[in-house]
Image: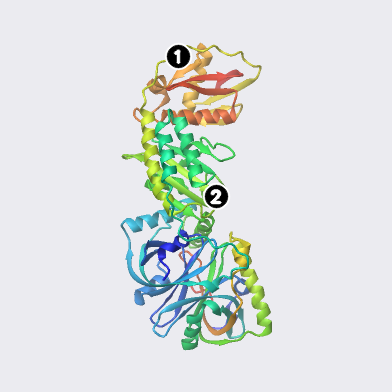
Amino acid sequence: MTSLRELMPCFQGVVPAAIVTCDAQGTPNVAYLSHVYYLDDRHVALSCQFFNKTKRNIGVNPYACVQLKHPATLEAWRLDAKFIRAETSGPLFDEMELRIQAIAAHTGMKGIFRLLSADVYEVLELQPEPGFVLQAEGDAPRPAMDESRAELRSLQVISDRVVRAADMSELLKTLLVSLCELFRVNHAMYLMHDEADGRLYAVESTGYDSSGAGAEVALGEGLIGTVARTRRLLRVSGMGEMLRYGRAVRGEMQRDGAEVTAEIPLPGLCEAQSQLALPLVVGERLLGVLALESADPLAFQDWHEAYLNLLANQAALAIERLGERADEEPAPEPERAPLASRRRVFTWYPKDETVFCDGEYLVRNVPARILWKLLTEHEQTGRSEFGNRELRMDDSLGLPPYKDNLESRLILLRKRLDERCPDVRIVPVKRGRFTLERDCELVLETR
Amino acid sequence: MGANLIDSELREFLERGLVCVIGTRSADLRPDWAHGVGVRFTKNRCVVFIEQSTAARSITNLRDNGMIALTICEPATHRTIQLKGRNTKLRELTQAEQRLALRLANTARHAVIEVGIAPRVAAGWNYSNLVAAEFELTGVFDATPGPNAGAEVA
């Protein structure tokens, strides 16, 4: 008999599975399943979001027949199964609920679309149905089902790079680029958790058309926000299918009179088909979220989760360590370059705590306060070198007294300037110190 | 109930040729699935075409007790309707039905290509050995995922 473990790609929810049950009078019922979860070689769990006919049927007749399909080849398997129990709490329920929460959070159904139970079935018989799809002549051999591989060596390389990074910028860049290499994906981003306002801000990214620095996600909002709120890893394969399912439920809920909210646009790739998001946590603190994306619906496998969890833990410790670094002493003030004839107008809106450059939004909150301080001091005194320590001592910036994420905020600010106003730059000169460089005349105004 | 209770919009949806999963059960109430293509309505009967290569058990079940359920699903929207029936009779397809089934199967293939299944994979979806299952319609239900799934629609 084929082993359930060999069917791992079928459990990713890319192609919907179907279940047939039968009531006591002998009337069969067909339903689609949003998620079939692999438990062990003899058990699966099916997600139950609504008290429906399937649920009523297995209450009187525990036998079911499930149709599972391979997401790449459409090959089908027939699972004869027997309902064992419904779990409404515990690790299995939590794990399955996280996916439902992510769908709900993304499609505007937070709090109204939720997992009722994780229904555990014993698999009595598992049969491949080779006649379901005809293999054309000359077809390449079908991919092996067991995708698990050992990539310990690569993991070790990334681990070494991460722990040796000299500063936050190097650490984040190394982490994202190495992850993309190891997992053969092209898109990754890191979002910093700002404990002051409870939001996540994109700080570093790789593989996107623009850096996206400063993009915001609220806790509990969408996939990344759900990962941040629950502090648990989430892998979504077949994002398109997940969203189609979520939108169908949302439409039905709306017709039923439920108050749904707007869909949350995904940060990053609009054509993403897989996403893997990991919380970076040290002790009770959430430092940020690491998100990998791919246009391939099957980009991430089970083994990625375990490996990435290890790496995320190590990266979290490294971020924490670099955040605690003592600032170094100031270097002599460098000579100022002659100014070009260009002119840049920076506008500070104290009410919104926002800085605009030439009439366009640049940055807000703490990074905006930092930038305004640097610009005004530079204008008033001619100073161009600054240190992290003095920023930390300045109460007006509103940095938290402890674990202030200053390095990440400066990276965000540097990237926003790179993209929106390359004439003004923040350039690190040594650990804990940076210079404000400019190739333009500055005009500062407050409104 | 008669097919005349199905309104024209619903009938068009059901007869378009979308993804069809068939449910049956054995004498000892063990369920089974088969895949099919369909459907077509006559005055008091409904016909669906079942692919026999993966339906040995369901064919036996239908000969034994004639109880049938089937879903018609539009993958792009998840809109799903379930039909239930009894007194199913199996027979060979007429020549007109052979042509119809071919057309419906191609529509079903396009429906899955629309949601990202590779065209060459969808092309391999097997509808080469069909049998016609004609049954008496007993109920039409909304099966779109959501709070209204299971509600009778005709």
| Picture coordinates of residue B94, whole percent (x, y) | 66, 85
Residue type at mark 1? Ala
Is residue A383 or residue A180 the one in the foreground?
A180
**In the image, is A174 to the left or to the right of A316?**
right
Q: Earlier in the sequence, mark 1 or mark 2?
A: 2
Distance Cα–Cα, label 1 vs label 2: 45 Å
In terms of secondary structure, where does tag 2 sit? Answer: loop
- Judge left or right: residue B95 versus residue B73: right
Residue A216 seen in the figure:
no
Which residue is painted at 52% across and 46% down in the image? A185
Q: Residues within 10 Å of mark 1 (few under 14, many from 20)?
A: few
Percent x, y of residue A264: 51, 48
Q: Could you tell me the amino acid type at mark 2?
A: Ala
Q: Which mark is residue A272?
A: 2
Q: Nearer the viewer, mark 1 or mark 2?
A: 1
Q: Residue at x 62, y 15 (%)?
A: A339
Q: Specify the quadrant that holds the C terminus of chain A.
A: top right
Q: Which residue is mark 1?
A: A331
| Marks 1 and 2 share the same chain | yes
Quarter of the image with the N terminus of chain A is: bottom left
